[in-house]
Image: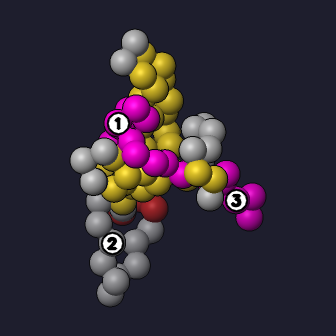
Amino acid sequence: MTKFGSVKVGYGFECEKNNGKTYAGEIVKVAAYARGTLVTIRYPDRLENDRMYSVGEMSMIHKSIYLEDCKVWFTEEPSLV
């Protein structure tokens, strides 16, 4: 993971906002606005340890975050496995 790394669609993203909330997921959209850079991530609704999900069964949450509202963020290039 790269601290304050490039934000690109498909990259992994983790951040801590100035209010202390943390988020992590996959970047699905990046847009520049007058207020700043808006990054939209997606992550699973919830994971239950006792059940395996197929991709089609998993419900995904989308969250948009302004980088300017983050204390710190980390990005990671997608693996090519």
Task: State which region is magenta.
Answer: 63-81
Q: Which mark is residue 79?
A: 3
Looking at marks 2 and 1 on the same chain, the residue that comes earlier in the sequence is marked by 2
Q: Quadrant of the N terminus?
A: bottom right
Label 2, label 1: how far apart the Cα atoms are: 27 Å
Question: In the image shown, does 45 or 14 lie closer to the viewer?
Answer: 14
* Image point (40%, 45%), residue name: 71
Q: What residue is shown with label 2?
A: 47
Name the outermost residue toward the left: 19
Image coordinates for residue 37, horizontal then vertical, percent: 46, 26
- Which quarter of the figure has residue 56? bottom left
Amino acid type assigned to the residue bearing label 3 in the image: Ser
Q: Quadrant of the C terminus?
A: bottom right
Question: In the image shown, does 76 or 27 lie closer to the viewer?
Answer: 76
Question: In the image shown, does 8 or 69 lie closer to the viewer?
Answer: 69
Q: What residue is shown with label 1?
A: 69
Image coordinates for residue 3, horizontal then vertical, percent: 58, 51
Q: Secondary structure at mark 3?
A: loop
Badge 1 crowding class, 10 Å Cα cut-off, few under 14, some 14 to 19, many 20 or more, is some
